[in-house]
Image: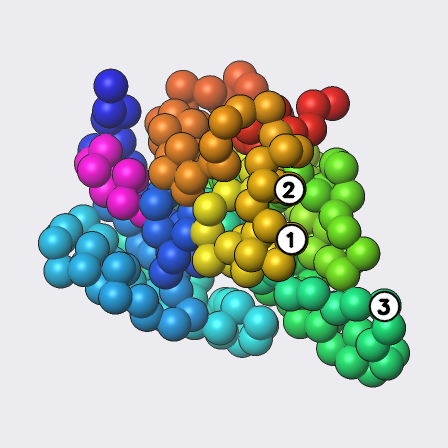
Amino acid sequence: MQIDLSSRKIFITGAGKGIGLALTHYLIQSGAQVWAHYRSLTPELKQLEEKYALLHLVQGDLANPLEVQSVFNQVTSAAGQLTGMVWNAGIFEGHPTDLSTAAWMDIWHKTMNVNLHAVGQLTHAGVQHFLAGGQGGQMIFISSRAAYRGETADFLAYAASKGAVVSLGKTVARSFGKQGITSFILAPGFTRTQMAERFIQEVGEDKVLAEIGLNELTKPEDLAPLVALALSGAMDHASGTTIDFNAASYMH
């Protein structure tokens, strides 16, 4: 059953591909107006824009703090009062420990800029926006199984950034619930996205499948109904919850 989001205005980051693209498609099909951020326009996102009048695109590089604020301002200027925000954009770049310190730290800083600093800046702007509107709203943080289980040695920055996102989402829930702002953290495991596909090819799909409790890897569209439910307001009393979505590969 499709969730009715026809009264909702939602801002999502990282909508060009993978989880963000799947969420954007589902939210539009549920009737929401969606302001979708992308860094590089993909053919798939462009096709959605051509098909659905409910979709509005905003470009920006979230590694640049000035562009982060510009993207948020563009969205709110066009949309007026938002009801939901989904912080999905992220990068997954390896930096083996045998790199030089300078090279290792370059990837560390790049990862933190996109996966954490931009999320923090958008969260600050988003909380101010919700408080000013007086009606509150839902905020979704896309974290990762890596925040709890840890990641492989080449992805220390990724795991650290996603762990911080969990804490940020929980703190928003504790701090602003009485003002009507609810917060949810989604922690996917390996999901069939371009970002994860490179890793799957490197280690072998059989090895990845052996780690999970189901017979197939999670697809981006599998996450969409849950995100839509949270954005509908029906899950508000679960605010602060981290929802594992990892095909039974890690439970805690």
Question: Is residue 162 rendered magenta in the image?
Answer: no
* Three-letter code, disc 2: Lys
Q: Which residues are magenta?
A: 24-32
Q: Residue at x 42, y 28 (%)?
A: 226
Which residue is labeled 2 in the image? 207
Circle nearer the N terminus (1, 3)? 3
Circle nearer the N terminus (3, 2)? 3
Q: Residue at x 27, y 60 (%)?
A: 45
Mark 1 lies on a secondary structure that is: helix
Q: Whole-Å distance between the Cαs marked 3 and 2?
A: 23 Å
Mark 2 lies on a secondary structure that is: helix
Residue 97, numbered circle: 3
Image location (x, y in percent) of residue 36: 34, 56
* Three-letter code, disc 3: Thr
The number of numbered discs placed on residues in the rendered structure image is: 3
Which residue is labeled 1 in the image? 203
**Quadrant of residue 15 within the rendered picture:** bottom left
Neighbor class of circle 1 (other Cα within 10 Å; few <14, some 14-19, many 20+) is few
